[in-house]
Amino acid sequence: MSNSEKVNCHQHGIMDYALVCQHLVNQKESDTPIEYFSGEDIGDLDESEVENVWCKSCDDTLIEQGEWNDVSEAFAAPKVICIACLQTIKNRNMKGEL
């Protein structure tokens, strides 16, 4: 990721960041793993953009709405997290297929 903006993570320090749905960010380690999806997987991301990751519930809402709009974005309520925290979330969950 070549984005010049960074986030100061309390765990990992100054890092590149990602936008991740509230459901994945708020998930507890003891919760059942859930599917996640990424704009990176569908070619919807170039080197200068931030990675976007969302859960199956958000994907269902996205499909229902037909696009990211006020309804689907409000449901996802994406949070800014560092890429190291994102990797932890990815490791804890299973990748969905788009």
Image (cartoon, grey):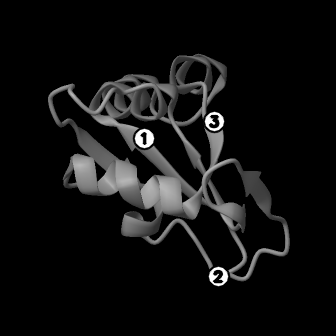
User: Which residue carries the number 2 mark?
Assistant: 47
Q: Is residue 94 shown above or below 5? A: above
Disc 3 is placed on an element classified as strand
Q: Residues within 10 Å of mark 3 (few under 14, many from 20)?
A: some
User: Which residue carries the number 3 mark?
Assistant: 79
Q: Position of residue 5 (x, y in %)?
A: 84, 66
Q: Quadrant of the C terminus?
A: bottom left
Q: Nearer the viewer, residue 32 or 42?
A: 32
- Give the Cα separation between the discs numbered 1 and 3: 10 Å
User: Which residue carries the number 1 mark?
Assistant: 54
Q: Quadrant of the N terminus?
A: bottom right
Give me the residue at 46% from left, 49% from top. 53
Q: Position of residue 66 (x, y in %)?
A: 45, 32
Q: Residues within 10 Å of mark 1 (few under 14, many from 20)?
A: many
Q: Position of residue 61 (x, y in %)?
A: 39, 23
Give me the residue at 22% from left, 46% from top. 93
Evaluate if marks 3 and 2 touch, with contact meaning CB atoms under 8 Å apart: no
Mark toward the start of the polypeptide (3 vs 2): 2
Quarter-of-image position of residue 95: bottom left
Closer to us: mark 1 or mark 3? Answer: 3
Disc 1 is placed on an element classified as strand
Q: Is residue 10 left or right of residue 21?
A: right
Q: Is residue 48 shown above or below 73? A: below
Instruction: Inspect the image, locate mark 2, and give the three-letter code of the amino acid beneath it.
Output: Glu
Give me the residue at 80% from left, 64% from top. 6
Q: Nearer the viewer, residue 28 or 53?
A: 28
- Give the Cα separation between the discs numbered 2 and 1: 19 Å
Instruction: Inspect the image, locate mark 1, and give the three-letter code of the amino acid beneath it.
Output: Trp
Q: Is residue 47 left or right of residue 42?
A: right
Instruction: Inspect the image, locate mark 3, and give the three-letter code of the amino acid beneath it.
Output: Lys
